[in-house]
Amino acid sequence: MQTLKNILIIILIPIFGFAFFILYLDYLEEPKSEFSNYVEAKTSGIMDRGWIPTYIPKSAIDIQEQHDIDTNWVKMTFKYTIGDIKDTKEACESMEYIDNGIKFNCKYFSNNVSIILYDSGYAKLSSSPDYKNSNKYEETNNLP
């Protein structure tokens, strides 16, 4: 009985260790950040590193962000004060009214960015590299 217990321990410890290691690598590859408001996100340096555009509404709160270090995609949600669209509107290339809000198509570094500001005060942002319009793959792959 004791031998069976020892064998199970010897087998299970490496399996759990390996599983934890894989989960940790995933966390390092796709870190998540939370900020209570725009100012907190800005002072954290995440905007300077290019993960969150500076032109999201300044009223943004409850910011949830996740990005992939290798591919440079970003996905984010936040709440905002309805009507606070000036900076987003000025920075983006196009604006489209949708049934329940406004969709902005923008650029940030070499990324295509889509921001949807819903009429409810909820917002979603997603971005991905624009490889076909960059000069070299390396330039877009090495963004901050």
Image (cartoon, helix red, strand yellow):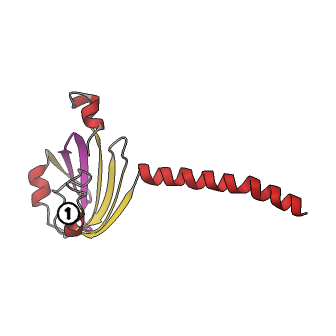
Element at label 1: helix
Which three-letter amino acid code belongs to the residue tagged 1? Lys
Q: Position of residue 127 (x, y in %)?
A: 29, 46
Question: Residue drawn at (65%, 56%), measured in percent from left and top?
Answer: 16
Front-lying residue, 70 or 58: 70
Foreground of the two, 64 or 32: 32
Q: Position of residue 84 (x, y in %)?
A: 14, 65
Reply above or below: 70 against 34. above
Q: Give the range drawn in magenta.
A: 100-121
Binning the other alpha carbons within 10 Å of mark 1 as few (below 14), some (14 to 19) or many (20 upward) gives some
Is the stretch drawn in magenta largely helix, strand or loop? Answer: strand
Residue 13 or 79: which is nearer the viewer?
A: 13
Lateral position of residue 136 relative to residue 10, left or right: left
**Residue 112 in which image quadrant:** top left
Q: Name the quarter where the N terminus is drawn.
A: bottom right
Residue marked by disc 1: 42
Q: In this view, does 2 lie to the left or right of 126?
A: right
Residue 13 lies in quadrant:
bottom right
Give the residue displayed 32% in from the left and 57% down from the top: 76
**In this rendering, does residue 13 appear at all?**
yes
Magenta region includes residue 113: yes
Asked if residue 127 lies in the magenta stretch, the reply is no
* In the depicted structure, whether residue 134 falls above or below residue 65: above
